[in-house]
Image (cartoon, rainbow, N blue to C red):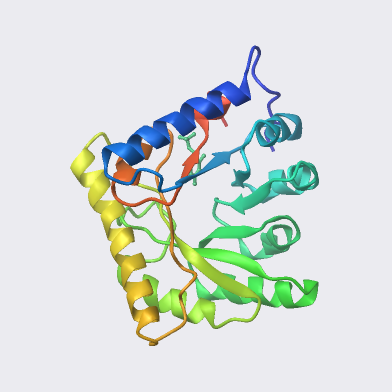
Amino acid sequence: MTPLSAAPDQWNPAARLEEVKARVHIAEAQCGRAGAGVQVLVATKTWDADAAAAVVAAGGAVVGESRMQELAEKGAALRAAGARVHVIGQLQRNKAGIAVEYADCVQTVDSMRLAERLSRLCLEAERDLEVMIQVNVSGEESKAGVAPEEALALATQVQALPGLTVTGFMTIGLNSDDEDAVRAGYRRLRDIRDAALIRSERGEFPLADAWHLSMGMSRDLEWAIAEGATMVRVGTAVMGDRAQT
Ligand SMILES: *Cc1c(COP(=O)(O)O)cnc(C)c1O
């Protein structure tokens, strides 16, 4: 594994976080969602435990980790710092135990096999775990996530598993400067979430907690917020550029 990076020189996490939160507030206001309270998850992957804990101390209440080896290394420090920890990278079933040990939420559930494993581990650990359904809205083959037309069925099945609560839907947007194309993907995720909430309200299935839309990163959080994001995932805009891995 690539060694984790120490915090950048002259780095002021509180100031960086304030800048990002200001961007979020402006974006909310510009699309008529002033006061929406969009949450900022700071992606701390590749940064060491001290750097990640500094972000938490600066007000980064939710952090995201992508690689389970890193989470195993930093998890205890993140929890001690008082962070809520979300898994935002692809999770292999044989690493699910690390997520159940340290994470509050796994945003990247895209199969029943993974969900069943998480559920079983939660029962053993006598804990509950929040999960989101990762959806591949762009249809790119390289991307993880369930197909949009299968997302609602998967959410329903996952919600039925003991120990798991589906709190929403997550996607990694198209990596493109084409605003229309990127936003169309985010809209697709919102449509899935809206369908889940409407059908839940009608009593067809219990997905009342599935209101989160985790979408948007440093480069495009404004577009995601305009399409209804409730949580944006920001790495470089707070932490600085990651070392090449
Ligand atoms: C790293 C990461 C982010 C943050 O990306 P930045 O471009 O650094 O803001 C968001 N989501 C996921 C899933 C990531 O792995």
Residue 185 position, x and y percent, is 28, 53
Report the residue that reaches farthest toward the left.
180
Task: Say whether residue 174 is visible.
Answer: no
**Residue located 30% across and 41% down the image:** 223
Q: In x, y percent, where is residue 80?
A: 80, 45
Q: Quadrant of residue 82?
A: top right
Position of 211 compared to 107: left or right?
Answer: left
The answer to whether residue 137 of the structure is visible from this angle is yes
Which of the two residues, 168 or 184, is positioned nearer the viewer here?
Answer: 168
- Residue furthest to the top in view is 10
* Rendered view: 50 above or below 28: above
Residue at (67%, 63%) from the top-left corner?
96
Position in image of residue 218 (x %, y %): 43, 33
Q: Nearer the viewer, residue 119 or 237?
A: 237
Asked if residue 180 is positioned above or below residue 113 in the image, the reply reads: above
Q: Which residue is drawn at 43% across and 52% down?
A: 230
Q: In this view, does 126 lie to the left or right of 28?
A: right
**With respect to residue 213, does 117 lie above or below?**
below
Where is residue 225 shown, x and y percent of the image?
35, 45
Question: Measuring 60% from the left and 53% from the top, which residue is drawn there?
Answer: 87
Relative to 182, is 50 above or below? above
The quadrant of the image that shows the C terminus is top right
Using the rendered view, name the quadrant where residue 113 is placed: bottom right
Quarter of the image for the N terminus: give it.
Answer: top right
